[in-house]
Amino acid sequence: MTLDSLRLRHLASTWFPLIVGLLLLVGTASAWVTYTSTVAPSTTTEERVVSSWETNGSFTHAATVQKSNPMFPVGQTLDGRNPYFLRVTPVLDGVFSFEYGASERGELDVNTTVFLETRRVVDDRDTETVLWSQREALATESSASLGPDARVRVPFSLNVSDVRHQSGQTEAAFGDLPGSTEMTIVAVVALNGEVNGQPRTTTERYTLAIEPTESVYYVTPNGSHETYQTTRAVPVETSSGGPWSVVGPLLLGMSGLGLALVARGRGDGYLSLSDADRTYLEYRDDRSDYDDWIVRMRLPESAFDRPRVVADSLQDLVDFAIDTDNSVIEDPDGDAYFVLHDEHLYVYEPPRSGDADLDADRDPDT
């Protein structure tokens, strides 16, 4: 037996209830992990897209040269230009296009209305106040039973110069108003029918902003597309693989083996230390703690003729040496410890463990 094994037995004996409790806790947890990861994998649900469809609306625009100028001949079409000239190309010709796509099938009735909206707006931080507004219908178009990827085209024309003049007259009637005048072409698309086997009814809005100045006007389209999805909760079984399927059984086996070993050790008395073993451990701990106060040397025979005073423990002998400003002398054979003081020989004889290997080992660091 080694000193380390004796200390381990002492530790296991002292903390036996806690060790058993920890092993039981680890065993229970690992059993649950093993069951959930290998025997009965859990089932969860997740949302999955089962169908989808999307709409797309866009504007194209152009203007034809109507008045003579040094740059463009009369009758030439300026396509997709920005800005346009207010005097030379006063009429904006545009086309609004709409289509939709579906992951399966679709059949929609599409009603499209294009109109001009003119209004006077005052923006105050996050608040928008409309002082006046006017609407003018430009075009309408209806299409029944429109299928996916089929396109609806709605042409329209707008004399930007005339609208700017009319807006100026409206503003003059009200006087000097705050804010600014906005001119916007709006396309409203009403959809009704069936897409991907589901009834669909919705309305979408697309805009084309027009910003006139003294000589030109700017066109800013705001085409966009919307995506609609249908989801469904689908049960998903979590994978039984992964590290826990290995770690769980491993911990379960280790905890079971640990419980069997400590139970057998307790039953065989291996974890129970005798009084002699405990006394010997206390001595070896004292020998390690007070090593700085102990020197090894062999005393002359005359020293043993002094009256002997026996100490109960090595700690008592060291305390006496400290109080009397002496050193503790250890016999090189490790059989006894001495303090020479006032013609007396103070002695402590270490206990024996009953194990030949331990008694032969006198190294204080072990």
Image (tube, rainbow, N blue to C red):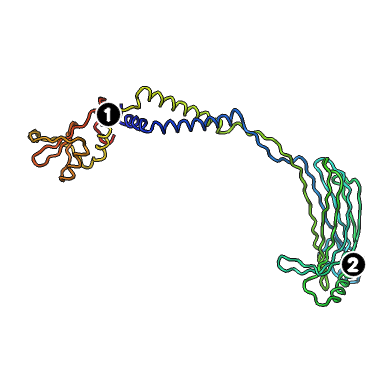
Q: Residue at x 91, y 59 (%)?
A: 139
What's the mark number on residue 159?
2
Mark 2: secondary structure: strand
Is 16 left, or right, of 274 in this rendering? right
Residues at circles 2 and 1 in contact by the CB criterion of under 8 Å: no
**Few, some or many residues within 10 Å of mark 2 (<14, 14–19, 20+):** some
Which amino acid is tagged 1? Asp
Direction from residue 243 to residue 56 in the image, left or right? right
Label ID, residue 275: 1
Front in this rendered view, residue 78 or 279: 279
Q: Locate residue 347, reporting x and y percent.
A: 15, 35
Q: In which quarter of the image is the N terminus?
A: top left
Identified at 88% across, 61% down, the residue is: 115
Q: Quadrant of the C terminus?
A: top left
* Mark 1 neighbour class, 10 Å CA radius: few under 14, some 14 to 19, many 20 or more: few
Position of residue 91 relative to residue 342, above or below, is below
